[in-house]
Image (cartoon, rainbow, N blue to C red):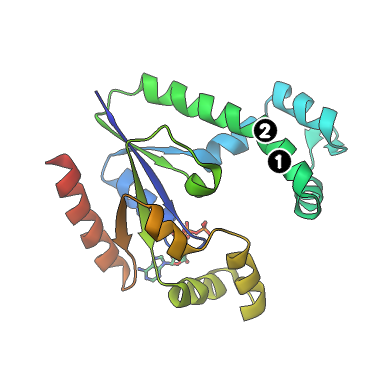
Amino acid sequence: PSITIGLTGGIASGKTTASNYLKKLGFMVIDSDHIVKELYEKKEVIDLISKQFDVLEFGFINKKKLAQIIFKQPKAKKKLESILHPLVFEAIDVLKHQAFEHLIFIDMPLLFEVGYQDIDYSLLIYTKPSTQLKRLIDRDFLTESDALSRIKSQMSILKKKKLANHVIENEKDILDLYQNMNTYLREVLS
Ligand code: ATP
């Protein structure tokens, strides 16, 4: 039987950095953002979405337009999620069942927001809010107020910290993150 770990974090807390490290070490990481990206290119999904939203352009979904619609209308966001989430979960399930690995990570930024349950443990890559803000500003060249409003649009990292089964600190440099991850991996593998 395999162990499935949901890897999550807040915006700019270091999920991608952590997930790249796991991949480099040879672990299987299922990337839910990548699954979503691929779904948007499937004819059935394009049909399902364009039936509900006026976003079809040259046979493809105009994602910018769709993002604007769901940003303004919470109901539309729910509708879109009700189309996409079951398909994402199904795709994850297929990948999981095809895997030979004993340990499987699922990189899912919105694990807690979505309430994805099909994991054994949740693992949070954590930075305190002030570090998160600084890294977000530096990475995306944002003003402080833009960065803050992006952070506020997600569940707070402090709340995620309470929900997570395991927390990996990403407060210092990258090498320190890798060391914290090694410690964690030694624990789950033992
Ligand atoms: P998002 O949810 O926005 O995609 P994320 O959680 O995947 O973000 P990363 O992109 O991995 O976060 O990290 C955010 C930024 O912080 C990146 O520019 C990354 O290089 C940097 N970063 C991550 N960890 C550290 C660290 N320990 N020290 C310094 N910079 C870091």
Q: Is residue 174 above or below residue 181?
A: below
Residue 17 appears in the picture as rendered? no
Q: Secondary structure at mark 2?
A: helix
Q: Which residue is mark 2?
A: 82
Where does the C terminus fall, quadrant-wise? top left
Q: Position of residue 55 (x, y in %)?
A: 84, 39
Task: Give the residue drawn at x 80%, y 54%.
Answer: 72
**Left or right of 179 on screen, residue 139:** right
Of residues 57 and 110, the one drawn nearer to the viewer in this rendering: 110
Q: Which three-letter amino acid code belongs to the residue tagged 1?
A: Lys
Pointer 1: residues within 10 angstroms few (<14), some, or many (20+)? few
Q: Which three-letter amino acid code belongs to the residue tagged 2?
A: Ser
Task: Give the residue drawn at x 37%, y 35%.
Answer: 119
Task: Give the residue drawn at x 58%, y 66%.
Answer: 151
Where does the N terminus fall, quadrant-wise? top left
Q: Position of residue 75 (x, y in %)?
A: 77, 44
Q: Position of residue 13 (x, y in %)?
A: 44, 63
